[in-house]
Image (cartoon, rainbow, N blue to C red):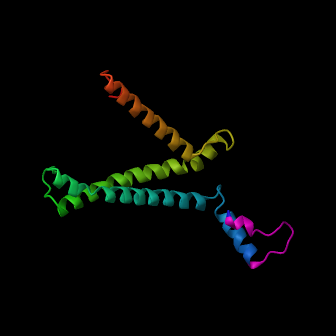
């Protein structure tokens, strides 16, 4: 977006700044492969960052020890923390790769669908799935409060 401000006007002589802006604009155009590769890497990276920040704030090994909980076969304290971090990294890897694939799905589906016939964004898909899952959880909670058998099994 910033590169668009520095693009040379049509028919105008191209300066060094204009040439660099044109190269950046063409390289990171949303129809270009470089854009989608960087987008995939950013989604995976920020998924790891978000998970790390969220998990560190919970102090799960300390809370487990404080409330008398334990993981069978794992000693309390530092070994528990290392075990949980190892498991968290494995789960996050699968989740991050899945989110990255969902994020770049429009790039791969555009040639298959012919371009303009299927217009959607990966962000829209993630929002819809998140809202549906949250709605299902709320319905399940309401049904359990009223002593009904739930429909999520």
> As drawn, is 119 to the left or to the right of 52?
right
User: What are the residue bounds of the magenta stretch?
Assistant: 2-16
Q: Identify which residue is drawn at 46% across, 50% down.
A: 99
Viewer-proximal residue among 78 and 147: 147
Q: Can you give x and y, in whole percent of width and height, for residue 75 in the image?
A: 13, 58
Report the residue that reaches farthest toward the bottom: 16
* Residue 4 drawn in magenta: yes
Q: Name the dominant secondary structure of the magenta segment.
A: loop
Report the residue that reaches farthest toward the right: 11
Q: Can you give x and y, in whole percent of width and height, for residue 128 in the image?
A: 52, 38
Q: Can you give x and y, in whole percent of width and height, for residue 106 in the image?
A: 58, 47
> As drawn, is 137 to the left or to the right of 27?
left
* Residue 138 drawn in magenta: no
Residue 14: which quarter of the image?
bottom right
| The N terminus lies in quadrant | bottom right
Q: Identify which residue is drawn at 18% across, 61% down.
A: 79
Report the residue that reaches farthest toward the top: 148
Above or below — where is 66 with respect to 140? below
Q: Can you give x and y, in whole percent of width and height, for residue 55 in the image?
A: 33, 56
Q: Identify which residue is drawn at 47% across, 40% down.
A: 130
Above or below — where is 144 with respect to 63? above
Viewer-proximal residue among 45 and 53: 53
Residue 51: which quarter of the image?
bottom left
| The C terminus lies in quadrant | top left
> As drawn, is 18 to the left or to the right of 107?
right
């Amino acid at each position: 977006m910033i590169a668009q401000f520095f693009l040379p006007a049509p028919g105008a002589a191209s300066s060094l700044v204009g040439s660099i802006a044109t190269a950046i604009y063409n390289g990171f155009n949303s129809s270009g492969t470089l854009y989608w590769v960087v987008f995939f890497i950013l989604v995976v990276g920020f998924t790891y960052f978000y998970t790390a920040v969220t998990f560190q704030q919970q102090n799960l090994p300390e809370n487990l020890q404080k409330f008398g909980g334990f993981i069978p076969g794992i000693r309390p304290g530092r070994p528990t923390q290392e075990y949980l971090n190892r498991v968290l990294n494995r789960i996050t890897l699968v989740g991050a790769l899945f989110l990255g694939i969902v994020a770049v799905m429009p790039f791969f589906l555009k040639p298959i669908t012919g371009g303009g016939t299927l217009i959607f964004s990966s962000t829209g898909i993630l929002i819809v799935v998140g809202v549906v899952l949250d709605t299902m959880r709320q319905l399940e909670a309401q049904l359990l409060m009223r002593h009904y058998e739930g429909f999520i099994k």
